[in-house]
Image (cartoon, grey):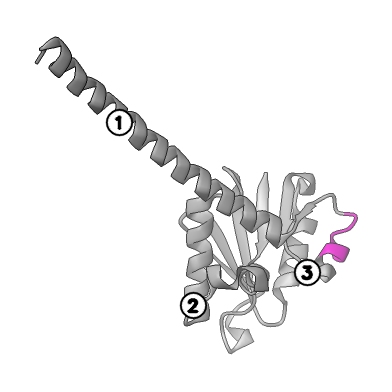
Amino acid sequence: MEYILDGYNIIKNDRFSDLFNAVSLEKSRDKLLNFIYSCQPQGNNEVTIVFDCRSNNPFDFDGFSSQTIIGMKIIFSDGHLRADDVIVNLIEKSKNAYATTVVTNDKGIKRRLGGSGAKVQSVDEFVLKGIKNSQNKNKDKNRTADNNMTEQINSEFIEKWLNKK
């Protein structure tokens, strides 16, 4: 299973603006990467994030540029193609579109992917799943701390009550 994310569609979503808002677009992209890395709304599946053109000069690239950061593939469209076009092209060229989930609220992308077999997940569903995962991880950490504290208390009681050291 692979997830393809419409990067700016997630970052610029009004509902989660406080989560990804930053002083620059680059910092907002970094916040998205950190969110995905730490909260794992995609589970253990591969992630490709597609953004619109990074350069002011669309002739800098030939189609799109790609790099991998902390295990996630990052694609910037070239300026001639929009991120929407890159996402659709990735699905069209995919050997198994049925095993791909595209995360977007963009109605145009959803319409273009209609017969492809790819699943479409809303930005809200994806981000909320990540937030829930993060909360569950924090609960697990608290449980671990509680268990450690219980063991420490039990050890102290054994020493005091049974005079064992």
SS of the residue under disc 2: loop
Residue extending farthest front: 161
SS of the residue under disc 3: loop
Q: Can you tell which mark lies on residue 22? A: 2
Specify the amino acid type for callout 3. Asp
Tell me the crowding category of disc 2: few under 14, some 14 to 19, or many 20 or more residues within 10 angstroms, Cα based.
some
* Residue located 52% across and 51% down the image: 39
Q: Nearer the viewer, residue 126 or 1?
A: 126
* Left or right of 27, for residue 78: right
Residue extending farthest bottom: 56
Residue extending farthest right: 115
Marked residue nearer the N-terminal end (3 or 1) = 3
Q: CA distance from mark 3 to mark 2?
A: 22 Å
Residue behind mark 3: 106
* Left or right of 77, for residue 71: left
Q: Nearer the viewer, residue 130 or 63?
A: 130
Specify the amino acid type for callout 2. Ala
Between tags 3 and 2, which lies in front?
Answer: 2
State which quarter of the image contains the N terminus.
top right
State which quarter of the image contains the C terminus.
top left
At which x and y percent is residue 23?
47, 82
**Residue 15 appears in the figure:** yes
* Residue located 81% across and 67% down the image: 109
Marked residue nearer the N-terminal end (3 or 2) = 2
Marked residue nearer the N-terminal end (1 or 2) = 2
Residue behind mark 1: 148
Q: Nearer the viewer, residue 83 or 149?
A: 149
Between tags 3 and 1, which lies in front?
Answer: 1
